[in-house]
Image (cartoon, rainbow, N blue to C red):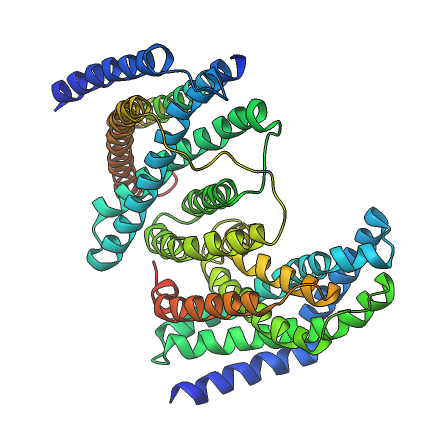
Amino acid sequence: MKRIFTVFALLTGLLLSYALYQALIVAPTEKTMGDVQRIFYYHVPSAWTAFLLFTINFVASVVYLIRRSSAADALAVVSAEVGVVFCTVVLVTGPLWARPVWGIWWTWDVRLTSTLVLWLIYVSYLMLRRFSASGETPVLAAALAIFGALDVPLVYFSIWIFRTQHPQPVIGGGGSIDPRMWHVLLINWAAFLCFALLICWSRYRLEVLKREVEEMQALEALLQPRGSR
Amino acid sequence: MTLSTITRATLMKDLRLEWRSKDAINAMLFFALLVVVVFSFSFDPNAEESRQIAGGLVWVAFLFAAVVALNQTWARELRNQVLDAYRVSPAPANSLFLAKAIGNFVFVGVLEALMTPLFIVFYQLRAVGPVWQLVPVAVLGTWALVVNGTFFAAVSIRTRSREIMLPLLLFPISIPAIIAMVNATTAILTGELSIRVWIVLLATYDVVFTIACLLFFEMVLHAE
Amino acid sequence: MNFLYAAYAATWIIHISYLATLLLRYRRLRKQIEELRRSQ
């Protein structure tokens, strides 16, 4: 298992460097935005990966509530945590792209605002996991994950109405993307997916180890007479 | 032992408790009053501006004040292990949840009724749109806050830092409801836009989360 | 152009700092395991 992990890590590293080379050098320069547009190759794959991880979190939470399996709960923690990391990348690279292109760091546009709210929901999920007693954490967290997932369409819809009623800066949407750009984008997405899988893998092993240690500690506390430690 | 008798009994117990002590309502009222005063110092608006921002101010004040009552919901039952007694009793968990949610709805409703005149006086509010429409907005909006608030208060009571946890869980989930309430209120005050879409959104939010709360509350109550 | 480098750098700073926290947590666990072994 350790061998596979190492090989996979090496492959991911190679793929990431290749994707970086593609994004910086091979991909054609966009006409109006210039080189700044290359942020796209990091921004968009991170966003897709984050949304995928949040979906996995939802599915794992539902599975946990049905089967009560500890593995599903571990998967839920892992996907939420790594998802928040990728979502943070999206929220940081977004303004860095917006500033030179639109002249503003942030606009309360549908996609930006929904992503921010999603980030908030999952941060609150992680905080709940951190602050609740270990025995009841999985159930409470799974309930919050499902509430969060129910909230997503409402968030998107409410911000969409909110924004269409107010004036906003025009965002360069629409128009078709150069097929070469698509190619680079997909390579970058593949690379980041592998990277996400790699992190999730190590985080999952960490979670399993942590649970074993907690169990051992609980056993220890039971076996040892009170006061002597 | 039907759903409605237990709900009624618990609700009456909570209302009577509150009527005798008036702890929650006093704390909420004073808190909302402070918010009103502090906001008026930080904005100092004229009549036209206050019409634009009042929707946001009112709901932010109510939201923060509601957290005070919501935190009390289950904390009150921790004394003498009442909550544990609920857990082992054969009474359906949902009847308890409904009683608590309705109780909170009454508390926050009373708060809103008492605070609204104050807002009108302090901010020289005069609605341009149809004022009666504020009633459905307030009813749906309050229920949206209270139903999830009661649920997440039951979640946060199980965590280490109880009082802090509730707003951290409740506010992100409530964002669509807050957007709808604030915009509907502003639309009525300025009389510029229709509020129908916001009412639909609030009603959807209420239905979705009421069902979700009723489905999951028993699980959360018995989580260990 | 600077914004491009800033964005790429920020991405990797975020990922690497997350990996660093993972490593830290892993080390702490190792230490706890050692302690458990010794106490047995």
B54 sits to left or right of B3: right
Near-viewer residue (A73 or B56): B56
**Residue at the (35%, 74%) spot, across then down:** B88
Left or right of A141 in this view: B174: right
Q: In this view, does B156 lie to the left or right of B104?
A: left
Q: Position of residue B43 (x, y in %)?
A: 82, 48
x and y percentages locating residue A46 in the rendered image:
37, 30
Image height of A193 relative to A10, above or below? below
Q: Residue at x 49, y 32 (%)?
A: A91
State whether residue B116 is above or below residue A8.
below
- Occupied quadrant, residue A191: top left
Image spot of residue B155 (x, y percent): 45, 58
Could you say which is closer to the camera, residue A166 or residue B65? A166
> The N terminus of chain B lies in which quarter of the figure?
bottom left
On the question of residue B47 being in view, the answer is: yes
Which quadrant is home to the C terminus of chain B? Answer: bottom left
For this rendering, which residue is in front, B214 or A20? A20
